[in-house]
Amino acid sequence: MRHITKYLLGSMLAVFATGAHAGELMPYTAYSNTAISITGDIQMSAESIVIAGTTYPLTLVRTIDAQQLTEAGKIAGTQNPVSAHFYKLAIPHAAKLVNDNKICGDDVDASWLLAVDNKGANSYDHTLALAFFAGAAEPDLNYDVISKSAGVLCGTFNYGK
């Protein structure tokens, strides 16, 4: 029962952070150069992310707690994070993305996703920063560790709402 409650709470928090109701995909406009050239605009819910017309299921690993938000923001390249969620996913290296680009490179699958919700000073200033990671083992979400680990962080992508 504890696992079900933990899962439901995590799912509700993820839905709250994305502004989506369970299963509802929210559109995000590619903002950064990496997002524009690799993923294009995306849609995301608590259960899935749609990139270049393909839906990839998301499994919530955990909600990032308040003490780790600044660290999550540094990893994802955003300065004012208000919430963050860490997911398991599977985007194969052969996935067809914008201009045949890859999330993690030619021979590497994307396995993990850090989604950081950022709110600016204005109510309309809402951005989503995504950091994709490779590898079978869960990455250590410590900025210093990530910055020194070759091949773990695939890239960061920023979107507007």
Image: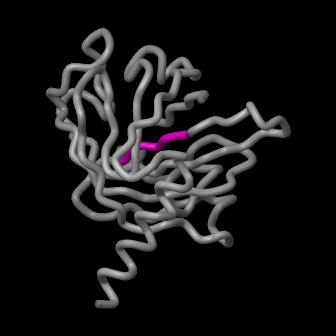
Residue furthest toward the top?
Answer: 99
Residue 157 rendering spot, x and y as whole percentages: 50, 32
Residue 52, by quadrant, is top left
- Residue positioned 57% across, 38% down in the render: 128
Q: Is residue 121 above or below residue 106?
A: below
Q: Quadrant of the N terminus?
A: bottom left
Residue sitting at 78 percent across and 39 percent down? 120
Residue in the picture at 48% in, 16% down: 36
Residue 136 image position (x, y, % from top left) = 22, 59
- The residue segment tinted magenta is 129-133
Q: Residue furthest right?
A: 121
Q: Nearer the viewer, residue 127 or 130?
A: 127
Where 108 sits versus 95, above or below? below
Which residue of the protein is positioned furthest toward the bottom in this rendering?
Answer: 1
Between 12 and 36, the one lying in front of the other is: 12
In the rendered structure, does residue 56 fall within the stretch colored magenta?
no
Q: Main secondary structure of the magenta part?
A: strand
Q: Quadrant of residue 102?
A: top left
Q: Residue 25 location, x and y as percent?
A: 39, 37
Asked which colour scheme the image uses, the reply is one colour
Q: Is residue 65 left or right of residue 123?
A: left
Give x and y (percent) for residue 140: 44, 65
Which residue does the image show at 74% across and 48% down from the upper left? 80
Residue 34 is left or right of residue 92, and the answer is right
Q: Quadrant of the C terminus?
A: top right
Q: How many marks?
A: 0
Nearer the observer, 91 or 141: 91
